[in-house]
Image (spheres, rainbow, N blue to C red):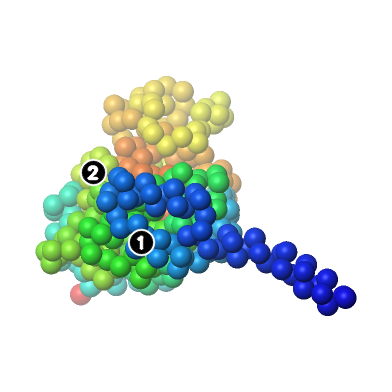
Amino acid sequence: MRRLLALLILMTLTMPAIAEANYSERDDVRGFVNDMVKKHRFDEQILMHWMKSVQQQKTALDAIARPAEGKPWKDYRPIFITNKRIAQGVDFWRKHQDILSQAEQRYGVPAEIIVAIIGVETFYGKRSGGYPVLDALTTLGFDYPPRAAFFRKELEQFLLMSREERFDPRTLKGSYAGAMGMPQFISSSFRSYAVDFDGDGRRDLWGSTADAIGSVANYFSRHGWRSGAPVISRARVNDSARSLASKRMRPEKSIAEYKQVGVVPVKNFKDTDSAILLGLEGKNGQEYWLGLNNFYVITRYNHSPLYAMAVYQLGQAVASNYHGVSSRK
C-alpha cells in the first residue's frame, strides 16, 4: 500500500513537468505556431515537429533571474577587466588587425570598442554559449511571464532568421537568453544589423570572425556612434551636486550646465557636449563619471551603464597594451 501511495505521489509530482516540457501540446504554443503559419507562411507540421523536440531549459530560467548587472560596479568590474582578458584582446586584435581596420574605416567605430564587445560577450569567441537557441527562446517565451512577450517576439525573429540564412534552427547554440555567435546578437539584432563582411554571401556570426567584427561595427554605427568623439570621463563633483547622479543613460544636460552646478569632467570636453552624470560604487568608494553620446550608444548593446563601463575600460586597456606591443616590434 505504501509503495502504491508513493507511486501515486511521484506520478502527481512529475505529470505537470512532463506536460510543461512537451511544448507541442500546449495551447499557447499552438497559437504561436498558427500565427507563424498565417503571418509568415511557415509549414505547420514542421513547426510542430520542432516544438515537440524542444526541451525546457530550467537553468535558463534560473540564470535570467540573477543577471550580473545586478552587482555593484566594484564586483562587476573584476569579472571583465582581467589581465587574461586584456592579453587575449591584444592577441585577437593582432590576429584580425586587417579586418578591424577595414571595419573602423567603413563604420567609424574604433577597433578597441569592437574588440572589447567581443571580449566581454564571449571571451573573443571562446564562450558563445551551449544552449540550443530554439529551446532557450521557447522556454523563456512560454515559461517566463515577466518577459514572455519579448522572448516570443525573439523566437519569431529567430525562426525567420534561420529561414533567411538557411540555418537549421535546431542546431544553433547560444546563451541562456538566446544571444548568438561571437558578438551575442539576439535574433532581431541579427536580422537588422548583422552583415556579410567576408563577402561569402552569408551572415555567419558563429564561424566568421569578419562577419562578427563587421556586424558589431555596423550595430554601433546604426545606433549613432560619432567617429572620433569622446566617450566618458571621470568627474569632480561637489557635495551638493552628487544627488544629480542618474540611473538613466541618455545624455540630458550640457557640460556647461553641469559645470554651473559643480560637476567638472577630468577630460577636456566641449561645453556644448551633452552628458549624463553616473554614480558608481567603486572599490575605493563612490565614483562619478560623465558619459557622452558614444557612451550611450554602448548601452544600446546592453542597457546597463555597468556593461558600457566594462566595455569602455576593457577597450582602453587592450588598446594601451596593443599599441605598446606594436611599438616594441
Is 301 drawn above or below residue 253 in the view shown? below
Q: Which mark is residue 45?
A: 1
Answer with left or right where residue 135 lies relative to residue 207.
right
Say whether residue 230 is left or right of residue 309: left
Q: Quadrant of the N terminus?
A: bottom right
Give the residue drawn at x 24%, y 55%: 194
- Which residue is at 13% across, 63% downward? 201
Residue 245 seen from this side: yes
Can you give x and y, in whole percent of width and height, for residue 304 in the image? 45, 45
Number of dots carrying numbers: 2
| Residue occupying image coordinates x 14% and y 59% | 102
Mark carried by residue 222: 2
Say which of 211 and 136 sits in front: 136
Q: Nearer the viewer, mark 1 or mark 2?
A: 1
Is mark 1 in CB contact (under 8 Å) with mark 2? no
Q: Position of residue 246 (x, y in %)?
A: 49, 33
Residue drawn at x 47%, y 60% as measured from the top left? 24
Instruction: Give 1 or 16, whichever is nearer the viewer.
Output: 1
Query: Could you say whether the residue bearing mark 2 is in a helix, strand or loop?
Result: helix
